[in-house]
Image (tube, rainbow, N blue to C red):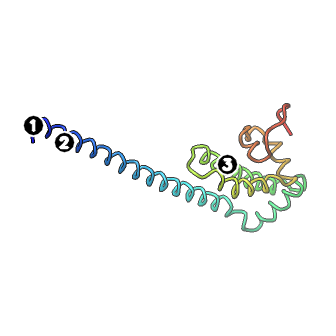
């Protein structure tokens, strides 16, 4: 074997090594991406669990039900609690939408699970009124996620 042939063979072996390394790195990056998405979905799920925790205790559950049916039926103390509960849910929904936007959680799973839950929460008569009163807290993206696109006038 000539020196020139050995050089060509070394280049071929080197090229194969580079290609193998790139394939290995691609597999590792894909695996890491899947792991990060799983961790992000776990974080979102845990965040939602924490956001819902206060809803399961009295008097919060009663206040949420009463306020959802008729916001004006709440006394001042109940209204303060309701504002806190709804603000917490709205903040958490922002986190869900942001995680989806960053492609950290799967869009189809997000819409199937979380969007429906939050649309139900914010779709009650009292919660709809609360959103209207607090529209400064709701950007177009969140409004659309909960209700569909805004009308041309900027409101429903």
Residue placed at 73% from the left, 63% from the top? Answer: 55
Q: Residue 27 has which mark?
A: none
Residue placed at 88% from the left, 58% from the top? Answer: 69
Residue placed at 85% from the left, 31% from the top? Answer: 153
The residue furthest left is: 2
- The CA distance from mark 1 to mark 3 is 69 Å
Left or right: residue 41 compared with residue 85: left
Measured as percent of width and height from the top left, residue 145 is found at 73, 46
- Choose mark 1 or mark 3, whichever is in front: 1
Measured as percent of width and height from the top left, residue 4 is found at 13, 35
Return the residue nearer the eye: 26 or 3. Answer: 3
Residue for badge 2: 9
Instruction: Mark 1 or mark 2: name the one nearer the start of the chain.
Output: 1
Image quarter where the N terminus lies is top left
Instruction: Mark 1 or mark 3: name the one nearer the start of the chain.
Output: 1
Neighbourhood count class around disc 3 (C-alpha, 10 Å): few under 14, some 14–19, many 20 upward: few
Return the residue nearer the eye: 112 or 61. Answer: 112
Return the residue nearer the eye: 43 or 3. Answer: 3
- The CA distance from mark 1 to mark 2 is 10 Å
Would you place residue 57 above or below residue 155 in this image?
Answer: below
Measured as percent of width and height from the top left, residue 64 is found at 80, 60
Disc 2 vs disc 3: Cβ atoms closer than 8 Å?
Answer: no
Measured as percent of width and height from the top left, residue 85 is found at 73, 55
Return the residue nearer the eye: 26 or 6. Answer: 6
Residue for badge 1: 3
Left or right: residue 120 compared with residue 73: left
Residue placed at 69% from the left, 58% from the top? Answer: 113
Q: Secondary structure at mark 1?
A: helix
Residue for badge 3: 91
Q: Secondary structure at mark 2?
A: helix
Instruction: Mark 2 or mark 3: name the one nearer the start of the chain.
Output: 2
């Amino acid at each position: 074997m000539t020196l020139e042939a050995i050089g060509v063979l070394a280049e071929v072996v080197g090229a194969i090594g580079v290609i193998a390394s790139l394939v290995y790195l691609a597999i590792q990056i894909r695996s890491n991406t899947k792991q990060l998405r799983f961790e992000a979905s776990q974080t979102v799920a845990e965040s939602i669990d924490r956001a819902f925790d206060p809803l399961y205790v009295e008097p919060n559950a009663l206040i949420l039900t009463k306020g959802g049916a008729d916001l004006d039926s709440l006394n001042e103390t109940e209204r303060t609690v309701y504002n806190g509960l709804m603000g917490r849910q709205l903040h958490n929904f922002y986190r869900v939408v942001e995680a989806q936007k960053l492609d950290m959680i799967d869009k189809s799973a997000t819409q199937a699970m979380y969007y429906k839950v939050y649309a139900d929460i914010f779709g009650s008569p009292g919660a709809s009124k609360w959103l209207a009163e607090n529209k400064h807290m709701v950007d177009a993206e969140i409004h659309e996620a909960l209700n569909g696109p805004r009308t041309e006038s900027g409101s429903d």
